Amino acid sequence: MTKIIWMSDPHFQNKGTIDGLNPRLRIKAAIDHMHAQHADADFGIISGDLVGDDIVGDYTGIAFHLAKSKIPMHPMMGNNDDRSGLRAHLALPDQAMPDFVQYVINTDDAAFICLDTQKLGSHAGELCSKRSDWLVQILDALREKPAYIFMHHPPMTLNLPAQDEIMLEKADQFLDLISGYSNVKHLFMGHVHRPTCGTVRGIPFATIGAISFQAPAPRPEWHWDGFVPPAEAPHYGVLHISNGDVTLQYTQFCNYETGFEN
């Protein structure tokens, strides 16, 4: 069995707050809780939007916190990330793509594929031909080994109207690609700052809330111009994966008030 800690969207800032929320205290609380309750995890994955606007300062800061983790944490690209900044401050597996932050974490009985879906200059995502070709090569090589795909941008509508505006572009092409491989067992996605789950093309999927602030429920309707984070506590995911079977536990690691400075 493989046990994974899944975090997403820390939106780390080395200084200041996000609408009064100190993201440094949130990521510290998540790591402390992980150490106390899930020190037996094999590794962790952070599915994008690691930092804010200060590329050097924010990546330096989050690298400082992640270096304290007793569990190896694997960073991924989100729409707010910077490929050069991430590579300069955070470690990637040796076999990662040279131009994009895409890589595979292999275990004895499974492969965990981490994709880079950033589209420069956009909050929506893309998987260009180079990244798609890499994915095909990886899936072809895996043959029947179970594969689990982590990505930032969802490739399907989630009935979350504001978030559906900034999903993966050309999603049908991506779904056509992966649904041709029977060993793709599950999709895991960040970006939307809310937990959802379902199936698409017969493949199970899940999204997750953020380490930082959460997004409101779809009702009452809201839009980004009037975005106000709800008073909901953050969480991370605890994944147990064995022989193609998956369980996901959404785990609250602190109170909503943690990180807010009065």
Image: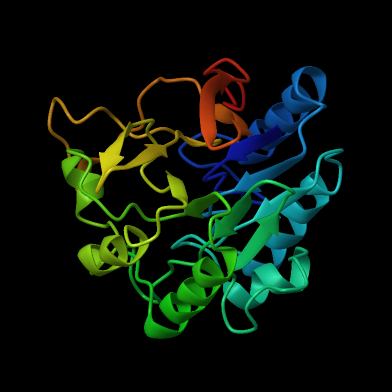
Q: Is residue 85 above or below residue 151?
A: below
Left or right of 114? Residue 70 is: right
At horizontal 55% and vertical 18% (from top left) the residue drawn is: 257
| Residue 227 placement: quadrant | top left
Q: Which quadrant would the N terminus be assigned to in this image?
A: top right
**Residue 40 visible in the current orientation:** yes
Image coordinates of residue 155 in percent, x first then y, are 29, 56
Q: Is residue 161 above or below residue 37?
A: below
| Closer to us: 131 or 164 | 131
| Closer to us: 69 or 177 | 177
At horizontal 35% and vertical 71% (from top left) the residue drawn is: 126
Left or right of 39? Residue 261 is: left
Left or right of 206? Residue 159 is: left
Q: Is residue 109 above or below residue 198?
A: below
At horizontal 66% and vertical 72% (from top left) the residue drawn is: 85
Left or right of 190? Residue 42 is: right
- Colouring scheme, one of rainbow, by chain, secondary structure, one colour: rainbow
Image coordinates of residue 98 in percent, x first then y, are 65, 83
Image coordinates of residue 217 in percent, x first then y, are 25, 27
